[in-house]
Image: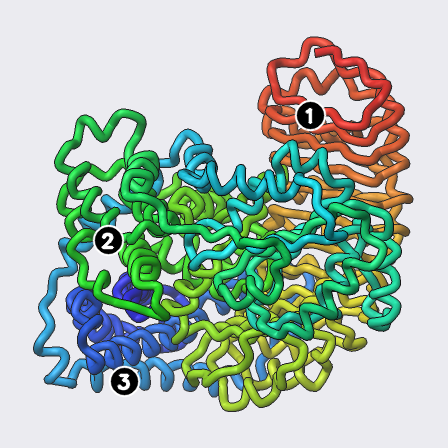
Amino acid sequence: MAELAFDLAVRLTEKLGSLAYDEICLTWAVQSDLRKLERTMSTIKDVLLDAEEKQANNKQLRSWLRQVKNVFLDAEDVLDEFDREALRKQVVKKFHGTCRKVRHFFSRSNPVAFRFRVAHEIKELRERLEELKGNKSIFDSLTSHSKGYYDDHDSNLKHANKTRETYSFIRASEVFGRGFEKEAIVNRLIEQCDDCVSVIPVVGMGGLGKTTLAKLVYNDTRVIRNFELRIWQYVSPLDFDIARLTKEILSSVLGTNISGELSMNQLQEKLRDALKDKKFLLVLDDVWNEDAYKWGEFRDLLVEGAKLGSKILVTTRDVSVASIMGTVPTNIYLQNLSEEDCMSLFVKCAFKEGEEREHPNLFEIGKDIVGKCGGVPLAVKILGCQLYSKTDEREWKMIRDSAIWELERDGVAHVLPALRLSYTHLPPHLKRCLAYCSLLPRTYEGHDSWLLINFWMVNGILETHDHGNLELEDVGELYFKELWERSFFQNVKDRSLYFEFDMHDLIHDLVRSVAQDECFVVDFEGTKEISENVRHWSFWEPEQNVSSILHKRNRLRSIIAESTDINESFLQTCFSRFKYLRMLLLRNTTFEAFPSSIVSLKHLRYLQLNGNARISKLPDAVCKLQSLEILIVRGCVNLEELPRDISKLISLRWLEITTKQTSFPDNGVGCMKSLRYLFIRNCGNLTSLPRDMSYLGALHTLIIIDCEQLDLANGNYQLIPLRLRSLLIAGVPRMVALPEWLQGAANTLRGLYIWDCENLDALPEWLTSFTSLRILDLSECPKLVSLPEGMHSLEVKIEDCPQLKRGI
């Protein structure tokens, strides 16, 4: 991500300019050092755009840019100290009634030494930049043209903020020109055959649309009617793990997660029973396995007891894989799209309907671009979306004439250059967002947009100054939709409050290539050399040696891990070594104690301990993390209670909890004025919400799921103004009516979702006064008999509410 050095320099110089006159820097006596650092950084900033443009063919320049970027990132860490000190002062001021206690709570062993350390680090940063500036062979060869950048940058922002009215054109074009292949596959699936289980491979290079085509076939009505059971299974590219596949397929068939304690024999027996006497369709997507013995072993497991006519559809890039797995006489080979089909697809993506006739010059340039894509629909689609609504011929010619087309990798000559071009021409804020997608595991389907947006937020990518009064999370959703609009995400599904999405393997390759200097991912691809300058690390493979990978890395900002091997020793290492850590995400771990030494992570903004069934307590030290914005302890079913000083987390915007406590204490969750999102899930003992919700003035999303004892009306709630925009209540059997306090959100509530509330019998008449309400989603409420009359026009979704008589 060296090409983003200029954008980072802009943000840092702006911050330095504001800090130079801040009370804190005067207190620390570092004003002079900050101004010197700002001048040096500004001088280098002025030549960075030229450096970024010239780096492609200059290895020495690329190395210089990486060094500059690393100094800037280190500077960002140091400047974060000022923000943290400002937050500390806010806490002291807010709890002034217990001033002595709070000052002790945030005491430092040696404030003078701390001040000298910061001053020394600022001086060291300036010296490192002066040394880079002194590289005559590099610096003197570059020219300053930062002013023009701002014009282009503003133009990009304006374009980026224009949202298309619909994304349906993307979905409609995903399988453009593949109607013949689709019919051929459907016919083979539904035709009668003598084999108990037939295997049909679909073969083609990356980017031709194998997965998209297979999904259309999978959801075809004729296919649905023909099979009792349909299973979709993504296969890890480099690991045909029979045990894992068996477990995941069994989970899909049974519709529930399978215990990790079952042996392989037990898993196989359960899968045989689940498939016995059933006619099924199993799709194995993106198979790379060339081990015929492994495949035979796995196929035998599926065949035993299956009903005649069951089918397995395989997508693969490798002809040898198809020959090993296939049982039908001929495979289905996807060819490159014809030039005519490619141009039709490009026009659909790059122009509004009929607009191509108004811009004949752009149409002709588009023909040249399409010709360079070599008939690969992924490349055509992404570049077409990149140029959507752009009418400046220079932008089209820059893509057509780029030297990147000369690049070639792994024989995929047409795809990766096109993807690289699509990245190069993104606005800076979207480049940063896309690069962070490299932290997502390649082996997952159904990524969560909320998780990704939180990645962006805690790393300072989201900016509100160009978006009016929008919250950071809303800005993140805009960025997500912009990347979706440009086809970097696929199979996007609206899950009411968030989006679920996938990323094409080639997009994964792209984002990992552009982020490799900053982001390191350990997954089924295995370990590789890791740079000492890596800032973000994700770990998705339990077999890897964590300690060896982390050795001598002290600049990490993010650690994302899913492994039962994470223990207290690992955490102690992280807390002592990575003082600038901003994000710690630990899923499905099994440690029992969480170290109090987390207090050393003063810059931590995101802490997730999802799915730890053993941990019973969070240390009070967590509450000293005044920079913390997101705390997730969902699925920690043995957590006794939240820390008593949780209200001191004055920056907390997002809280997800599972707890065994019966009530929230005073001066706790209900007093968190910065909280925007509150998720209460699987709290089986909880009987009431916080007694005083008047402090939750910033809360706009409240989600309550599976709380059997919760009485939403239990408490002394006053009708106070609320800013709630979304309320989801699911699995709350004691709710017989909506709580009265909800009336405080009459002017703000947009979405009301009520699922699986077995005793809800009516909705109140006062719901008709909710002028902002746009979505009413009701599901599995068997006693609900009617809706209020006179409600204004809104989208109503009703499912499994047998007695409901619609009164709208």
Camera-side residue of 339 and 53: 339
Estimate the spatial distance between the alpha carbons at disc 3 and disc 2, rounded to whole Å: 43 Å
Snapshot colouring: rainbow
Q: What residue type is labelled 3?
A: Arg
How far apart marks 3 and 1 lie (CA) works out to: 60 Å
In the foreground, 23 or 671: 671
**For numbered disc 3, what is the local secondary structure?**
helix
Residue 7 visible in image: yes
| Location of mark 1 (residue) | 797
Q: In which quarter of the image is residue 708?
A: top right
The amino acid type of the residue labelled 2 equals Lys
Circle 3 residue: 128
The residue depicted at 23 percent of the width and 44 percent of the height is 155
Q: What residue lies at 60% left-to-right and 67% top-to-bottom?
A: 324
Q: Nearer the viewer's eye, disc 3 or disc 2? A: 2
Of labels 3 and 2, earlier in sequence is 3
The secondary structure type at the circle numbered 1 is: strand
Q: Distance between the residues labelled 1 and 2?
A: 46 Å
Label 1 sits on what residue type? Lys
Residue for badge 2 = 372
Q: Position of residue 346 (x, y in %)?
A: 30, 40
Q: Position of residue 313 (x, y in %)?
A: 62, 52
